[in-house]
């Protein structure tokens, strides 16, 4: 059975979602993306208060274009105490879509569908994909082993083909897209669209420091490493001198404590809090503690450009 294209799902001009990126994504980027005919998504956690989230919803709704779309990313498990309130605000104010991460999306799907918002769900394997499919999600965000941040374990082709063969809803590929040829490739595997993040870090409109943006220009795919020092779970970062200095593995104490079932979740929580603070500091100001999250697709980032010019590189 033919599956809807991303253009049909969101009424957009090109099969591209500007991926939600912690601390990076913002209203300005999203508006510029919509002007170019793509969709864009912002993590709800980028807003410290519900009032700020509501204001962003209103601004995006007012700026929506006829061939662009906007949405929000929600962490839907217990690690996000603001989840229910964030979902309520988004459903009240409206959006074109929500992307769910890290948890059961049923509550989000049920609430969003009541007000006409589509729900796409991050998945990394077939069992989760089949579960999401059965709950009525509109599409799968297939996070592969080329993605930035927390990534999946399978290569793009294998993951896309497996999910297409076993699920009824469209597959959107996330990870490893740095140029138009990469988009063409994953579409040929059966994806209906792509979610692209790292190439937009070095955009003029992004919220991060100029040092972070310039790092995405100066470093490339071979400089991306996996570290456990942010959230306790492997995450891709740029191999800066500071990352090399502190290493990429958990400390011996964390490794020992992680083997204790009762203590494991608390160790991860502490590591997550420490790691996110380091990421926030590095993203927002010049610091010698440079922990910059990015994926290998920064290989194609050669200059800090406006969002409109980055999009043109993908669709020209």
Image (tube, rainbow, N blue to C red):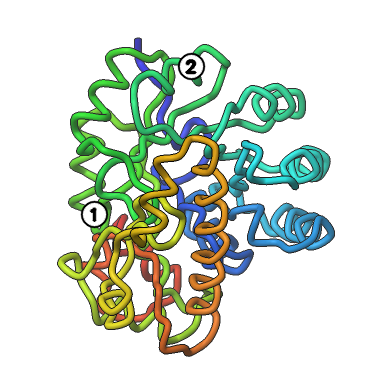
- Quadrant housing residue 262: top right
Foreground mark, 2 or 1, reads: 2
- Quadrant housing residue 127: top left
Task: Tell whether 37 sits left or right of 136.
Answer: left
The C terminus lies in which quarter of the figure? bottom left
User: Which residue is drawn at the image coordinates 60% and 69% (left, top)?
Assistant: 28
Residue 113 in the image: above or below residue 180 = above
Which residue occupies the foreground of this view, 188 or 242? 242
Which residue occupies the foreground of this view, 146 or 58? 146
Which residue occupies the foreground of this view, 137 or 46? 46
Residue under circle 1?
180
Number of other residues with Cα within 10 Å of mark 1, as a class: few under 14, some 14 to 19, many 20 or more:
some
The N terminus lies in which quarter of the figure? top left
Mark 2 near mark 1, Cβ–Cβ under 8 Å? no
Residue under circle 2?
131
Residue 95 in the image: above or below residue 27 = above
- Quadrant housing residue 265: top right
């Amino acid at each position: 059975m033919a599956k809807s294209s991303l253009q049909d799902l969101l009424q957009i001009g090109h099969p591209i979602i500007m991926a939600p990126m912690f601390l990076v994504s913002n209203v300005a980027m999203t508006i510029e993306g919509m002007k170019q005919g793509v969709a864009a998504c912002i993590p709800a956690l980028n807003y410290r208060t519900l009032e700020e989230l509501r204001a962003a919803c209103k601004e995006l709704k007012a700026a929506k274009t006829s061939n662009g779309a906007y949405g929000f990313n929600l962490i839907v498990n217990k690690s996000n105490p603001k989840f229910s309130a964030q979902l309520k605000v988004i459903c009240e104010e409206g959006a074109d879509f929500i992307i769910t991460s890290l948890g059961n999306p049923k509550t989000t799907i049920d609430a969003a569908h009541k007000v006409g918002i589509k729900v796409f769900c991050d998945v990394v394997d077939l069992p989760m994909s089949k579960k999401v499919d059965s709950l009525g999600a509109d599409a799968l965000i297939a996070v592969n082993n080329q993605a930035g941040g927390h990534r999946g374990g399978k290569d793009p082709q294998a993951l896309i083909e497996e999910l297409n063969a076993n699920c009824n809803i469209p597959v959107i590929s996330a990870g490893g897209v740095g140029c138009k040829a990469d988009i063409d490739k994953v579409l040929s595997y059966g994806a209906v669209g792509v979610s692209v993040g790292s190439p937009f870090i070095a955009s003029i409109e992004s919220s991060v420091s100029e040092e972070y943006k310039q790092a995405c220009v100066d470093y490339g795919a071979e400089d991306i490493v996996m570290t456990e020092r942010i959230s306790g779970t492997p995450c891709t970062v740029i191999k800066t001198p500071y990352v090399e200095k502190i290493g990429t593995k958990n400390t011996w104490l964390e490794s020992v404590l992680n083997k204790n079932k009762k203590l494991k979740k608390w160790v991860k929580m502490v590591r997550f809090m420490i790691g996110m603070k380091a990421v926030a500091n590095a993203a927002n100001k010049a610091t010698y503690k440079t922990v910059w999250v990015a994926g290998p697709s920064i290989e194609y980032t050669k200059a800090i450009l406006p969002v409109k010019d980055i999009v043109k590189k993908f669709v020209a």
